[in-house]
Image (tube, grey):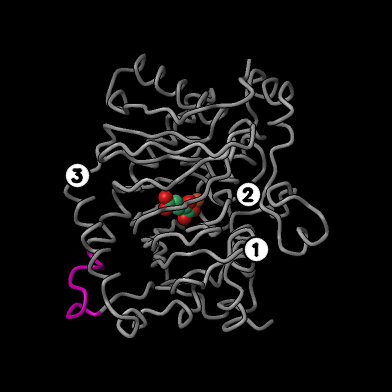
Amino acid sequence: MTPTSFESIPIVSLSDLAGDDRQRGALAERLCTICHEIGFVVVTDHGIDASLIDDVFELMQRFFALDDDHKRLIDKLASPHFRGWEAVGSEFTNNRVDVREQIDLWTEWPAVDDATDGPTHLRLLGPNQWMPDDVLPGQRDLTLRWMRDLGDLADRILELLAIGLGLEPNHFADLFGEQPMSLTKMIHYPPTPAGGAGVNAHHDTGFLTLLQPGPTAGLQVLNPRDEWIDVPTVPGAFVVNLGEMLQAMTGNYFVATAHRVITTTERLSAAYFHGPSLDTELTPIELPGRFTDAVAASERHRRAGFMASSEQTDAGVGDMASELSASTYGEQLWNYFCRSYPANVAAHYPD
Ligand SMILES: O=C(O)CCC(=O)C(=O)O
Ligand SMILES: [Fe+2]
């Protein structure tokens, strides 16, 4: 029986990832239940090197301490592929401006020459922008290692989720195709002004998010009673949460849960959004009856919605109560760019 709410975010050790089948099975079941009831979990013993986390935070400190003229060397507005740095005030979440600056880095694939003729999501393929080595030494190598190690961890968590859903362990790997597109966001939050938010309430749009929140509190999750629950800060732990596309693909058995950041002091975080090939279909997977029955028995799960566009919100659709309008990951991402980065879309794709 699904509890109707939650009061805290669980902390789970992933050490049994390396265990025998029975231990992995138990961990898989536990994670699946959490993804159904809460959609958020703090994980320890995840195998990501502590020194890698330290190096990434040190890199962020060095970058965000630069002046804006230097940061503009990788200005996101200059990238037709939505990659690079953006200043505080560039991003909109839930139609409200966020109080944070960030670097966005996506998996690199060759740009498509005639991207304006094909599906809109092809515009996302392309190179990242990297800081010159004499201004920010080592950014490229360190970031690529971060993306590779977090990608491997995300794949292992997806295997567990597949096992917990009664599927073959490689079910998601097989669905995710040959050209995976993941996003790394390196984020700096100044202290949040009264009444604002570092990032406003939202669902993650992707599949699976691994967040390194650093030592500073500020991330909050909305429970079904509309109370904001603080995510505990556990040294070295990652926060793992579900995005809207896994919600869709599991027929709402897993939930993408609303969250936001409000911080009283300066805060850094590094978020990794694990994603498949852009043409991956969001069609629900066929799951054993116990999972579909659990959704049917829970109004909250049956009604779990998706982020609305500004037009839908204007027309009276709740912020996170929209129907999924995209049929592929690429389409969903394009909708997200139009919602969150209108200036970038207007600069490069006036059509
Ligand atoms: O910085 C954080 O702690 C959370 C960031 C987040 O939710 C996001 O970028 O989607
Ligand atoms: Fe998020």
Residue hosting label 3: 50
Q: Looking at numbered disc 3 in the image, what kind of residue is underneath it? A: Ala
Question: 3 and 23: which one is in front?
Answer: 3
**Residues at discs 2 and 1 in contact (Cβ within 8 Å):** no
Q: Is label 1's Cβ within 8 Å of ligand 1?
A: no
For marks 2 and 3, give the CA distance.
36 Å
Q: Nearer the viewer, residue 319 or 23?
A: 319
The residue range painted magenta reads 132-141
N-term mark: 1 or 3: 3
Residue found at the very far right of the displayed protein: 315
Q: SS at mark 1?
A: loop
Cβ atoms under marks 2 and 3 closer than 8 Å: no
Specify the amino acid type for callout 1.
Asn
Q: x%, y% of residue 107?
A: 40, 62
Q: Residues within 10 Å of mark 3 (few under 14, many from 20)?
A: few
Closer mark to the observer between disc 2 and disc 3: 3
Q: Residue at x 38, y 72 (%)?
A: 128
Q: Secondary structure at mark 2?
A: loop
| Left or right of 321 on screen, residue 71 | left
Indicate the quadrant containing the C terminus: top left, top right, bottom left or bottom right: bottom right
Q: Does any portion of residue 273 appear in the rendered image?
A: no
The alpha-carbon separation of the residues under discs 2 and 1 comes to 27 Å
Q: Which residue is mark 2?
A: 281
Q: Residue placed at 27% from the left, 26% from the top?
A: 15
Label 1, label 3: how far apart the Cα atoms are? 36 Å
From the image, state whether disc 1 or disc 3 is nearer to you: 1
Q: Is there CB contact under 8 Å for labels 1 and 3?
A: no
22 in magenta: no
* Tally of numbered tags: 3
Which is more foreground, mark 2 or mark 1? 1
According to the picture, the residue beneath numbered tag 1 turns out to be 95
Horizontal and vertical percent for residue 26? 41, 17
